[in-house]
Amino acid sequence: MCVRNPAGNVFPVTIEGPPIARQVPSERTFHGDTVTDEFAWLTVKDAPETLALLEAENAWTDQATAHLEDLRGTVFQEIRSRTQETDLSVPTRKGAFWYYTRTLEGKQYGIHCRMPARPGETGPPAGEDRPGEQVLLDGNELAEGKDFFALGTYDVSPDGTWLAYSTDFAGDERFTLRVKNLTTGEVLADEIADAFYGSAWSADGGELFYITVDEAWRPYRVWRHTIGTTEDTLVYEEPDERFWVGVELTRSENFIVIDTQSKITSEVRVIPAGRPTAEPVVIAERRQGVEYSIEHHGHRFLILHNHEAEDFALASTSVDNPGEWVELIPHQPGTRLESVDAFTRHIVISLRRDGLTGLRVIADGSTAAYDMAFPEPLYSVGLSGNPEYDTSSVRISYTSLVTPESVYDVDLVTRAMTLLKRKPVLGGYDPADYEQFREWATAADGTRVPISIVARKGTERDGSAPTLLYGYGSYEHSIDPYFSIPRLSLLDRGVVFAIAHVRGGGEMGRQWYEQGKMLTKKNTFTDFVAAAEALVRSRWTTPARLVARGGSAGGLLMGAVANLAPEAFAGILAEVPFVDPLTTILDPSLPLTVTEWEEWGNPLESAEVYAYMKSYSPYENVIKQAYPRILAVTSLNDTRVLYHEPAKWVSRLRSVAPEGNYLLKTEMGAGHAGPSGRYDSWKEEAFNLAWILDVVGAA
């Protein structure tokens, strides 16, 4: 195989050095500042020279990591041998059926099934006997002959007759929506192209609400489709480009909710599910900076909001005449209320306090509440699979850095917790062989930054342990402690794993997020460097044995710390990295740009925002210095972080600091999440882990 780069050089599989991209000066001027972008030509996705360079980069990466082939194979087999390949999710009761997903050894994708629930049955039959099982959707059949497959919408109608599902075979998250008759097995001729995530059924299953996107990939229109016809009616269109639109059915199945949100403002409309052609009713007009969401509960809508409540409060308003908000749970600084779930006789609040998730239960008609208690010092907990409204028990998911994903049923009256399933980890895994810790770093401004750590028990604190430090730090998205089977391949080789809960995430409440966005974004980067320094200071590791890892907006973090503190790391793994943010946020025609202005600022209108973003943008700030080893992983069809950002970044690194070791790996048929099949994903992770082990000297 040969590939040709834009300079005209031909690269066979074995090449003498990394590809050198040609430089074509391209200038832009904003706010009196003229910038030359010599690799802007890489933005032309289908150009032969662009594809040739990406293929050449892949060939070079293959060659540069060829010595890790055996280790990759070993790590892949470790992941596979620890995973119960033929498995069954915990069945969930909905109406007259138990719903669940099965996986089969050797098959890439899940098989979605259901079986009839017997009268009075409180749980499905034990063991492998599944009488009356009906396969609703087999991902392996849908994916046959395709390089990529992803399921977007998967939504069974309230009466169990219809299944709405959508598929993506490219990775660009532009789905085709179809409807299947679950009684006959027939897939209807109804087919809707370019649909987005999300759907909602009318009460009788005759109407399906769905969403489409605009040219910038912004979900902005809600449609109503009449089943069995070509009739589609536009229900709502959002003209403000800052806002995304979502649609869903309430748990009570009484209302269709149209949720319109920007990064900092919300507006919600509802339609009675029994009258799907009715005009949407606004719960509360949008007010700049006020976020709220709703949940139906009997005669009222519950409203979780941040009006004069930074960490959110809970209120209610009348279903019949939405208007005045009645306070239910007042604002409590330091306790971030994240969501509310309503059941006939209880309300469950998902919250966050002191860097940990939690669940609070309130009985209907009572002001008394209790918080569920959990035994470990570090954990993540949340509601999971609760489609039934009329119930006095809920299902929760629980995990920690040492406890595999666990599913419990919780009796909301007696508070009894029943373990239904803990994810099997084959090969004799014992959580007692590992330890988890919470430590703190001190940022330059004195802020204490939490770090979650897991290591093999007995790991010496003498500075010798190889360490992987993970970070994200954007969109108020929290990286909570979680269990990972692939991570065991690191821990069992003596590698310490740590999560830096940096500002910009939501781990410590809304203020934590506010202090890591817009004109305070640099706190995200300096917090991560402080976490790395704290790991060294507390004698977990040394810079020579420390690798940083992050993806997407966490990839921006990786690029920023590479410029800011290259001496702090031996290597940096940047996955689908947002490393050219200023160029992207300056172009409102690109996917996500306009909606992102309330996260990063608008550099088109503000010279201050422009200068601030330019001062931290990884691509803009590459200089001639000694960089750590860098592996950038991306996907050609990614619509969230376009492939050319890491491609340009690596090209500039090679041009400006040519002594470094930089690799670019592009999945040529995938999207933001990388390969879609589980075995392909394991191979991808084995590639990444082998590279990490090589960098830290633990290969």
Image (cartoon, grey):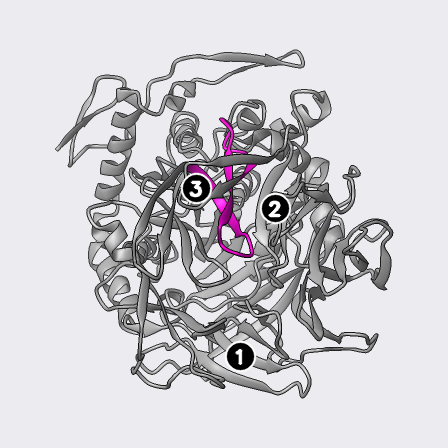
Q: Which residue is mark 1?
A: 408
Crowd tier of the residue under label 1, counting other residues whose Cα lies within 10 Å: few below 14, some 14–19, many 20 or above: many
Q: Closer to the camera, 152 or 158?
A: 158
| SS majority, magenta | strand
Of the two numbered discs 1 and 2 on the same chain, state the one appearing first in sequence. Answer: 1
The residue tagged with tag 2: helix, strand or loop? loop
Q: Nearer the viewer, mark 1 or mark 2?
A: 1
Q: Residue at x 43, y 41 (%)?
A: 576
Q: Is residue 310 left or right of residue 567?
A: right
Kind of residue at disc 2:
Ser
Kind of residue at disc 1:
Tyr
Quadrant of the image occupied by residue 246:
top right
- The picture places residue 97, in percent across and down from the top left corner, at 43, 72
> What segment is highlighted magenta in the picture?
194-223
Q: Residue at x 27, y 59 (%)?
A: 108
Q: Residue at x 66, y 11 (%)?
A: 32
How far apart are the alpha carbons under marks 3 and 1?
A: 34 Å
Quadrant of the image occupied by residue 336:
bottom right
> Considering the image in quadrants, where does the N terminus appear?
top left
How far apart are the alpha carbons under marks 1 and 2?
A: 30 Å
Kind of residue at disc 3:
Val
Q: Which residue is mark 2?
A: 474
Of the two numbered discs 3 and 1 on the same chain, state the one appearing first in sequence. Answer: 1
Q: Closer to the camera, 699 or 637?
A: 637
